[in-house]
Each structure stands twice: as C-alpha cells, then as structure tokens.
Image: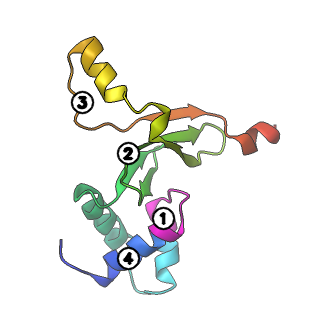
Amino acid sequence: MNYSRQRELILRVLHNNIVHPTADFVYELMKKEIPNISLATVYRNLNQLAEAGIIRRIESLDGAVHFDHDTHKHYHFICIKCNKVYDIPYDVAPDLEQQVLEKTGLEVTEHDIAFKGVCPHCQNHN
C-alpha cells in the first residue's frame, strides 16, 4: 500500500482515539488538519486500510462501522445502551479456535467476536 498523507493521519487519529471511532468521527477530526478532505476519501482510505489488515472494521449494533487500530487478537464488547465498543483481552478465551476445531471439525482461520450487553457506565446511570 502506497504512502499517503490521508492514510497517515487516519492511522494517527485511530491510535489517539481508542474509542473505536466511526468514519464520521475520523472525518471530523481530520478536517481540522486537512480542511478540504471529503468524507468519501476518509471512507475509501479506512476501507483500504482494513482490507490490507492494517486496521480492523467492527460492525456495530446501530449499523455504523467502527474502526480499530489494534489488529492483535482480541474480542469486542458493544454496549446495547450507548453503543460504545470496548476491547476484551484475548486471554479471556485463548483456545477458542482450538475448541471449535475439536468440537465441530471446523478450522477457524480468523474471527471477529463481539459480546453485547451493558457497560459499567450505563449500568450506573439507569
């Protein structure tokens, strides 16, 4: 993948905002540094980075796509009240792929697991 100023800025925005931002969120932050950037350019670059495996796409409950700079193995938790996305360490279930293979014969080459529920902030603000 070729270098571009837009991709470099997108990666910096993702690294500085571990909240798993949407393309719209990234776009709003990028406009401060590149005022003439288009939302389509942001979407295109985010999708190219995801396809190249440099970042991850996370499908959310509200249909919005969130992006994650962390490509290491981990799971996600999506709050059903505020729709925020949280990381869950991989060591919660490190042998999940092996268990799937042993119990079903299916060899998992990749997965994207998202748990859904209520985050601590929303639990305390009912």
Spot occupied by residue 42 in the image (x, y as percentages of width and height): 36, 70
Which residue is labeled 2 in the image?
A: 73
Front position in the image: 125 or 62:
125
Q: CA distance from mark 1 to mark 2?
A: 25 Å
Spot occupied by residue 19 in the image (x, y as percentages of width and height): 56, 58
Residue 38 quadrant:
bottom left
Nearest to N terminus: mark 4 or mark 2: 4
Q: CA distance from mark 4 to mark 2?
A: 32 Å
Spot occupied by residue 121 in the image (x, y as percentages of width and height): 74, 45
Which residue is labeled 3 in the image?
A: 108
* Secondary structure of residue under mark 4: loop
Placement of the C terminus among the 4 image quadrants: top right
Q: CA distance from mark 1 to mark 3?
A: 32 Å
Which residue is labeled 1 in the image?
A: 24
* Secondary structure of residue under mark 1: helix
Q: Which residues are magenta?
A: 14-26
Nearest to N terminus: mark 4 or mark 3: 4
In the rendered image, the residue lying farthest to the left is: 1
Which residue is labeled 4 in the image?
A: 38
| Residues at discs 4 and 2 in contact (Cβ within 8 Å) | no
| Residues at discs 1 and 3 in contact (Cβ within 8 Å) | no
Disc 3 packing (10 Å; few <14; some 14–19; many ≥20):
few
Position of 21 with respect to 40 (left or right) is right
- Residue 19 is one of the magenta-drawn residues: yes
Q: Which residue is at a point 61% across and 36% down the rendered structure image?
A: 80
Nearest to N terminus: mark 1 or mark 2: 1
Q: Nearer the viewer, mark 4 or mark 3?
A: 3
Q: Amino acid at mark 4?
A: Ser
Q: Which residue is at a point 72% across and 41% down the rendered structure image?
A: 120
